[in-house]
């Protein structure tokens, strides 16, 4: 992907593509518009220019592209720089950057963008914008505005006095750029009332205000591909997102009066922050209701009456393990619908996610942990294959039947949707089976999903069984002023947290490493531990029977085993090692399988057998640790430098993996020492 294509302005698919495009004459006022564009581009340029030297180098470009979901190699970055670098100094300066983004903007494209904005407000498609339509648009943005105030806004730009705005009036207003403050004064709205509207800074024209509102509803820009939009509005989809708390309350939900949405800070100074979350503005007693949602607010994959079957057909191609993608296609559908009921929620969703499928290629490698790398590659392959399937399925679909309103859905959009769902959805009880049991249904829970994670949460989710409330969050402990609202996402390891949520939990008590139960690996570990046995490659018949019961032998066996976490070692691996490192069939058969699987039951087959088992596990840990190409000290030195957020996340992840391996080795070494102290006593 070239640097130019990163900024390429793709034309939107118009629902009313048969309409002719009026010509527009150039006027001196357009020079002022270009100046404003250049000011905005300078702002974006500074975001790329991380070190502030007035130039964009290949490293800075690579970091930005990676954060936008477009990882590139060093060679590709050099090629991209050369595409734009007119003076051949190996960098992109501000002049080259502005030329790239302003050359070739044709009249047709300007008119097309204006037409798109106009159509958002023209809800009944009669060619004009009425006060009622403007009122409905503002309501869908979560703004409280009276119809009388909307009529005043219309009168301020209504040239022919017919009470509505036609496209020509809309176009002239946009091109001339009427000042926002002037219009507010001319229509007689006081400063107090004007704050009800999505108000841009005072220097922005009224036209910019309406364009911002329009873009909040069209939301048709490429996902994670438009660098300008990603940095002008780095956090949420809508440039001026609707008030989510007001929307939930207006739809019959409840939000405690002492809760607000706020940006959360990290513990470390000058950190990038933790994003948006919910914070208490006052003390909240334990047991208080914090948020309640009625049944119609959560977003789920329910087939709608009369809905085209295309979306359902697409969902059938999604494997169960990627359930987030199924709900993700519903999310994309609602994102594409102008005036969607869920837009006040969707408009507040992040533009990008810090999950590994959007990491630059180098930072994916920096994870260094093979099982996670396999999962990342697997998801990326699925997204690319699913993109092809979606395009094939939609190729012959009529616009009226198109589930995404005719908009292009690529792997980047699919990845965004899957990440949005995996990081925010909850599984709740849905419809009932005939036997009375419930179907677990993934749902996106607006506002509730802004609670962050903690293994010691101060809030908890409760599902209700009445018609008015589907789910609510209550205070599980007393919540102090300025405390974050936190839920327990589950006893998950850092693989899940990073893949689905985009963060790593330090010293996660449930983190673990995954190994394949393999005779060659076990033989190598036992030899390193000095306890070699032929039973790993050729278990005796009675040992095979126990391995079958442990599902570690035979067809359809599950050969993934874990070290670490709350169990310290997976019980199946512990039992298998105990059995294979013993040739005493009679001694083994004295114990049931649960005893052989329990580390708390003491050494069921004697201290010598137990010590051999633990030394083999220590050797397995050493082998696992050797597969990481860097040491923890080297990783920590990387974090002392200025690195991208994805690079930092990858390094912190692998530090946690190595740390848990070392902790496991220390624990088992301590256990071996205790066994050696007990062994002489046992021998007497």
Image: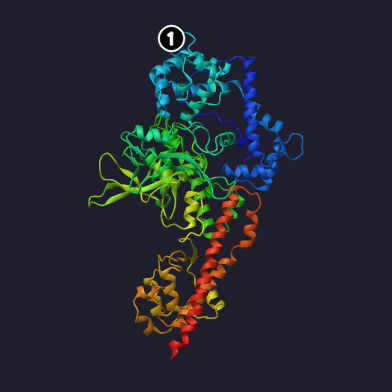
Height in image: 83 above or below 662? above
Locate the C terminus by quadrant.
bottom left
Residue 603 lies in quadrant: bottom left
Image quarter in which the N terminus is found = top right
Q: Write the residue at 62% across / 34% down.
A: 44
At 43% across and 29% down in the image, what residue appears?
Answer: 141
Q: Which residue is mark 1?
A: 162
Q: Going 46% across and 13% down the picture, which residue do you hit?
A: 155
The image quadrant that residue 657 belongs to is bottom right
Q: Looking at the image, can residue 278 be seen?
A: yes
Instruction: Locate residue 78, reporting x and y percent.
Output: 70, 43
- Residue pushed farthest bottom? 684
Residue neighbourhood size for the residue with mark 1, other residues' Cα within 10 Å, grouped as few (<14), some (14–19), many (≥20)? few
Image coordinates for residue 563, horizontal then vertical, percent: 48, 67
Vertical placement of 380 versus 185: above or below? below
Instruction: Please tell me how many numbered marks the rendered image carries.
Output: 1
Left or right position of 13 against 100 = left
- Residue for point 53% across, 45% down: 265
Question: Helix or strand or loop: what does disc 1 sit on?
Answer: loop
Answer whether residue 112 is visible to the viewer in this image: no
Where is residue 486 shown, x and y percent of the image? 42, 49
Residue found at the far top of this picture: 160
Above or below 549: residue 676: below
The one of 509 and 556 positioned closer to us in this rendering: 509
Q: Nearer the viewer, residue 557 or 564?
A: 564
Q: Nearer the viewer, residue 286 or 299?
A: 286
Q: How far from the left and from the top, in percent, is residue 36?
A: 62, 24
- Most foreground residue, 123 or 310: 123
- Asked if residue 5 is positioned above or below residue 492 in the image, the reply reads above
């Amino acid at each position: 992907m070239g640097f130019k294509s990163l900024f390429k302005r793709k034309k939107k698919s118009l629902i009313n593509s048969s309409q002719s495009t009026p010509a527009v004459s150039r006027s001196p006022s357009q020079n002022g518009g270009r100046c404003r564009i250049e000011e905005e581009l300078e702002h974006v340029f500074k975001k790329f220019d991380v070190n502030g030297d007035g130039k964009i180098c290949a490293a800075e470009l690579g970091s930005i592209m990676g954060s936008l979901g477009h990882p590139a190699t060093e060679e590709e970055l050099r090629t991209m720089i050369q595409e734009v670098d007119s003076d051949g100094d190996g960098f992109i300066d501000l002049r080259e950057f502005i030329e790239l983004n302003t050359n070739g903007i044709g009249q047709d494209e300007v008119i097309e963008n204006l037409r798109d904005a106009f159509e958002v407000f023209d809800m009944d498609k009669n060619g004009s914008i009425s006060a009622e339509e403007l009122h409905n648009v503002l309501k869908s943005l979560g703004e409280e505005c009276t119809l009388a105030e909307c009529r005043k806004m219309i009168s301020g730009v209504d040239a022919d006095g017919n009470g509505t705005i036609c496209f020509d009036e809309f176009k002239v207003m946009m091109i001339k750029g009427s000042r926002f403050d002037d219009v507010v004064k001319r229509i007689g709205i006081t400063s107090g009332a004007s704050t009800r509207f999505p108000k841009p800074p005072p220097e922005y024209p009224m036209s910019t205000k309406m364009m911002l509102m329009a873009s909040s509803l069209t939301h048709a820009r490429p996902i994670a591909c438009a660098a300008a939009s990603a940095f002008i509005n780095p956090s949420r989809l809508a440039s001026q997102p609707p008030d989510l708390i007001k929307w939930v309350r207006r739809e019959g939900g409840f939000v405690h009066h002492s809760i607000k949405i706020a940006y959360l800070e990290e513990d470390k100074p000058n950190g990038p922050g933790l994003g948006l979350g919910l914070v208490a503005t006052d003390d909240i007693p334990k047991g208080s209701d914090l948020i309640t949602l009625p049944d119609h607010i959560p977003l789920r994959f329910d087939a709608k009456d009369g809905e085209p079957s295309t979306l359902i057909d697409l969902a059938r191609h999604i494997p169960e393990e990627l359930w987030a993608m199924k709900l993700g296609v519903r999310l994309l559908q609602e994102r594409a619908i102008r005036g969607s009921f869920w837009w006040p929620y969707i408009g507040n969703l992040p533009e990008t996610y810090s999950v590994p499928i959007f990491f630059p290629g180098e930072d994916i490698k920096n994870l260094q942990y093979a099982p996670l790398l396999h999962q990342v590659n697997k998801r990326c392959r699925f997204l690319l294959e699913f993109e092809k399937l979606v395009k094939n399925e939609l190729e012959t679909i009529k616009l009226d039947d198109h589930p995404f309103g005719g908009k292009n859905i690529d792997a980047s959009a699919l990845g965004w949707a899957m990440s949005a769902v995996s990081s925010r959805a909850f599984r709740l009880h849905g419809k009932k089976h005939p036997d009375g049991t419930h179907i677990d249904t993934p749902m996106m829970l607006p506002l509730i999903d802004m609670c962050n994670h903690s293994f010691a949460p101060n809030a908890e989710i409760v599902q209700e069984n009445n018609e008015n409330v589907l789910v609510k969050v209550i205070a599980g402990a007393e919540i102090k002023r300025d405390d974050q609202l936190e839920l327990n996402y589950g006893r998950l390891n850092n693989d899940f947290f990073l893949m689905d949520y985009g963060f790593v939990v330090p010293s996660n008590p449930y983190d673990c490493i995954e190994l394949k139960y393999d005779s060659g690996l076990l033989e190598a570990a036992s030899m390193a531990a000095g306890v070699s046995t032929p039973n790993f490659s050729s278990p005796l018949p009675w040992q095979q029977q126990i391995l079958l019961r442990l599902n570690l032998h035979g067809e359809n066996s599950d050969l993934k085993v874990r070290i670490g976490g709350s169990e310290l070692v997976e019980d199946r691996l512990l039992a298998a090692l105990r059995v294979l490192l013993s040739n005493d069939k009679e001694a083994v058969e004295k114990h049931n399988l649960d005893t052989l699987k329990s580390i708390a039951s003491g050494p069921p087959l004697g201290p010598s057998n137990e010590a051999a088992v633990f030394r083999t596990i220590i050797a397995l840990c050493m082998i696992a640790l050797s597969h990481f190409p860097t040491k923890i000290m080297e990783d920590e030195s990387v974090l002392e430098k200025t690195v991208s957020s994805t690079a930092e996340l990858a390094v912190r992840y692998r530090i946690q993996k190595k740390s848990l391996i070392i902790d496991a080795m220390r624990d088992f070494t301590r256990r071996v020492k205790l066994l050696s102290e007990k062994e002489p006593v046992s021998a007497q």
